[in-house]
Amino acid sequence: MDQIKDARGAVSKTKAPAIAPNSWKEFRYDSLFEIKKGQRLTKHDMAEGKTPFIGAIESDNGYRQLVSASPNHEAGTITVSYNGSVGEAFYQSAPFWASDDINVLYPKFDMSVYVAMFLCALIRAENSASVTGGSGILAASGNRPFAFRLTRPAYPIGPSWKVT
């Protein structure tokens, strides 16, 4: 699990930027990401290996164990559980196998680890609001289009990842 240790080290050494949310707007998830589902991998089909298995758990970056299956998703993506620990969002820095309780967000833009961590925090916050009566976000399953919205910094013409 060097990838998790490396990510923690890189983030902990970075000074937190100032954030000015006065110009934030809503964006559809499917306008920012290609959203793909994970796949079922039964315990019967699991064997110890080198591929991180990401499940619907709230800790350890969603990491459950190492499996022998080849990765079914790429590094540089965000995983969000829609079953179990609903709305938990984690950045994945290495290729992995995502369980069928996971939606994987492939960015349609150049996403640094810092932008990813920021988005994970926003996704968790939006989900927390949905549990208490907010609009709801990534709890959808199946092949339904994601019409949910993410509030984030914006320029007049679209999303802005610039830190002010």
Image: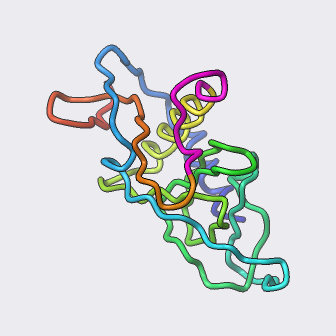
- Whether 3 is among the magenta residues is no
> What percent of the width, then of the height, locates residue 96?
61, 71
Q: Nearer the viewer, residue 2 or 70?
A: 70
Judged left or right of residue 127, residue 145 is left
The mark tally for this picture is 0
Q: Residue at x 34, y 29 (%)?
A: 26
Q: Quadrant of residue 19?
A: top left
Farthest-out residue, top: 22
Judged left or right of residue 64, residue 119 is left
Colour mode of the rendering: rainbow
- Whether 135 is among the magenta residues is yes
> What percent of the width, then of the height, locates residue 34?
38, 59
Taken as a whole, is the magenta stretch helix, strand or loop? Answer: loop
Quadrant housing the C terminus: top left
Q: Residue at x 81, y 83 (%)?
A: 48
> What percent of the width, then of the height, locates residue 149?
40, 35
Q: Residue at x 73, y 45 (%)?
A: 85
Does residue 14 sit above or below 79 in this rendering?
above
Q: Nearer the viewer, residue 134 or 68?
A: 134
Does residue 158 sit above or below 72 in this rendering?
above
The range drawn in magenta is: 129-140
> What percent of the width, then of the height, locates residue 124?
59, 35
Q: Residue at x 78, y 63 (%)?
A: 64
Farthest-out residue, right: 44
Quadrant housing the N terminus: bottom right
